Image (cartoon, helix red, strand yellow):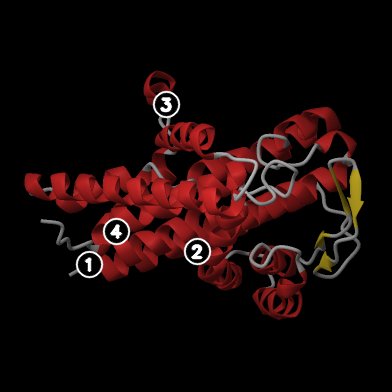
Amino acid sequence: MFEFVFPIQAVFLALALDLLFGEPKWLYARISHPIVWIGGLISALEGRLYRARNQIFHGAVLVAITVALCAAAGCVIAWLARQTGLDWILTGIVGSVFLAARSLYDHVVSVARGLSRDLDTGRAAVSQIVGRNPSELDQAGVARAALESLAENFSDGVVAPLFWFLLAGLPGLLAYKAINTLDSMIGHRNERYLYFGRVAARLDDVVNWPAARIAGCLLCLGGLLAPGMDAGKAWRIMWRDGGKHASPNAGWPEAAMAGALGIALAGPRVYDGELTDDPWLGDGDGAATEQDIARGCTLYRWTCAGILLALLALALP
């Protein structure tokens, strides 16, 4: 029953639709985004499974149930699409829902526009895409945070979903999004989730490992296409600094972005009121501006265009 062919045409269509139209806010205002449904499932399971003891085990059970249900939903949707004879078209439409290429770009552009007005507007815009409190960030800090988010979420929100979509169709894509949502909800290093969310956090690191390195390489290749970028430096900085980041994955696309733009990203920052002495990625003093955000968005656009053209070439008979 569940023997599927996942044509490359579906993956191309998914990315093309997402880049062209982004998220249909009018629709999600009425039925909520499917990621919200996954989040609701996680919250419901957490309420039943969270215990003071054996937290790693119970957290692992939550992860297993969530991922299995989402993968099963992907199987059912793919099977239903196949029955219509329009399987790759419907699969591509559904797949586009779980990509964030356009929305990521729009959010980062809004940070550059906000900074061009005043610092508070820039801080408000960047708060939509970063997990830390931006109230203490100066203009350069806001610009760096936007570029870091652009690079990291290019991996998590574009490359990784495409990778698992290509590898395992809708079941793989939905399973990946379940893992990513689990990490964002319970994969925190705080008192409540340090042990309960450990499996979710580690699994997220594992499934993002290949995509992070692919994303870094793609940004380097994008530097060959985008005007004014240093693709060679992007490659050198990625290999030199990609492993310096506290995250096993985030440093690779961030270092490639820093190298392509000729600036420094990451570095010391404040999380929950505490200063973390993170190393710099790239060369320079970290004095990023809204113009650097615009240049980062240019690199991002050319990189996404390159991915889309490569998928089109593979999809053509």
Residue where numbered disc 2 is placed: 207
Coordinates of residue 172 in the picture (x, y in percent)? 35, 58
Coordinates of residue 112 in the picture (x, y in percent)? 72, 40
Q: Residues within 10 Å of mark 4 (few under 14, many from 20)?
A: many
Instruction: Compare marks 2 and 4 and give the one earlier in the sequence.
Output: 4
Left/right placement of residue 7 relative to residue 69 reads left
Instruction: Compare marks 1 and 2 and give the one earlier in the sequence.
Output: 2
Q: Are marks 2 and 4 in contact (CB under 8 Å)?
A: no
Instruction: Compare marks 4 and 1 and give the one earlier in the sequence.
Output: 4
Instruction: Compare marks 3 and 2 and give the one earlier in the sequence.
Output: 3
Coordinates of residue 316 in the picture (x, y in percent)? 22, 67
**Secondary structure under badge 1?**
loop
Residue where numbered disc 4 is placed: 169
Q: Amino acid at mark 1?
A: Leu
Q: Residues within 10 Å of mark 1 (few under 14, many from 20)?
A: few
Q: Amino acid at mark 4?
A: Gly
Separation of disc 3 and disc 1 at Cα? Answer: 34 Å
**Secondary structure under badge 3?**
loop
Left/right placement of residue 141 relative to residue 26 reads right
